[in-house]
Image: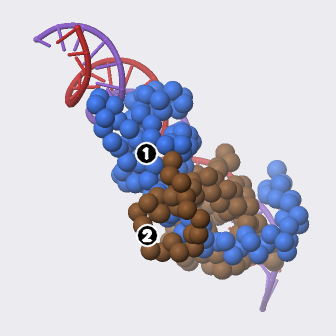
Chain colours: A blue, B brown, C red, D purple
DNA sequence: TCCTTATATCCATGTGTATGTATATGCACG
DNA sequence: CGTGCATATACATACACATGGATATAAGGA
């Protein structure tokens, strides 16, 4: 159903897969070992990662080698940069004052 | 249930709310107008954004003013930076013209 | 005190999605 | 060919979650 970059990374397992690809190409069985879920699940996640542009596939014999593509990361970077202003400016001005974000919710009961 | 940054931003409505806060404090009714969903939904989303550390609330009379907090953005930046290598390196390999900021040659892996 | 505005919470509902099991497809190699 | 390995897909299930409507709470103003 074509997820966007944030939706794609929202799933922890998928993020684990992405992280395991950080160091380069991997075949599915390797990823299965690190992912902690069943092989069918990994394949499905890899399919989703492929649909959303996060990975490329390269068949090699009976295996399939997956690798990260840079585009989605650039897209995230672009989105995030809109807020760079906010978090850089606030850094020194407020600093520790913002540290109590605890509670403050729910008045009574 | 305490969502992480990616899960929080996975919802498009929530992202729209965050974007509408980019320019500063807003009260709920303003956000409702831009969000395109019912007020109860907006309040729920704001609660989630609060729980995940994206926003602060400041009561002012009967209204509540919401504003962005920098922390989650820094966290995203941190995660993303692990991949900067990847997408800058690739950029170089593809010979993109927009990369005149790079000075040092990067050995390929 | 009553009425209105602003926001939060409860409830019911529909939809999405992550997962495992089982099965299919494709390649390798004897 | 037939057997085994690597990966993908089908199916069923369970659970999470976004949403609207109704209602609760709280403040402001007449």
Q: Alpha-carbon neighbours of circle 2 within 10 Å: few (<14), some, or many (≥20)?
A: few
> Dot 2 corresponds to which residue?
B96
**Marks 1/2: CA distance?**
20 Å
The part of the image, by quadrant, that contains residue A93 is: bottom right
Q: What residue sits 71% from the left and 73% below the top?
A: A86
Residue displayed at 66% across by 80% down:
B23
Above or below A40: residue B76: below
Q: Regarding mark 2 in the picture, which secondary structure is present there?
A: loop
- How many marks the image carries: the answer is 2
Identify which residue, A89 or B31, lies in the foreground: A89
Instruction: Locate residue D20, reporting x and y percent.
Output: 49, 63
Q: Chain of mark 1?
A: A
Q: Is residue B21 visible?
A: no
The residue indicated by pointer 1 is A67
Mark in front: 1 vs 2: 2
- Residue B36 seen in this snapshot: yes
* Residue B97 placement, left or right of D2: right
Spot occupied by residue B77 in the image (x, y as percentages of width and height): 65, 60
Q: Which residue is at the front of the view, A32 or D13?
A: A32
Q: Would you say the residues marked 1 and 2 are in contact, meaning their CB atoms lie under 8 Å apart? A: no
- Residue at 44% across, 74% down: B97
**Where is residue A8 drawn, in percent x and y?**
48, 51
């Amino acid at each position: 159903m074509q997820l966007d970059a944030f939706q794609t990374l929202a799933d922890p397992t998928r993020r684990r897969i992405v992280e395991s690809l950080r160091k380069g190409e991997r075949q599915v069985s390797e990823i299965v070992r690190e992912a902690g879920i069943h092989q069918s699940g990994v394949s499905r996640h890899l399919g989703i990662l492929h649909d959303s542009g996060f990975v490329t596939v390269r068949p090699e014999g009976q295996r399939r080698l997956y690798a990260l593509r840079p585009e989605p990361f650039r897209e995230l970077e672009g989105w995030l940069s809109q807020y760079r202003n906010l978090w850089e400016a606030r850094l020194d001005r407020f600093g520790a004052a913002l540290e109590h974000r605890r509670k403050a919710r729910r008045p009574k009961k």
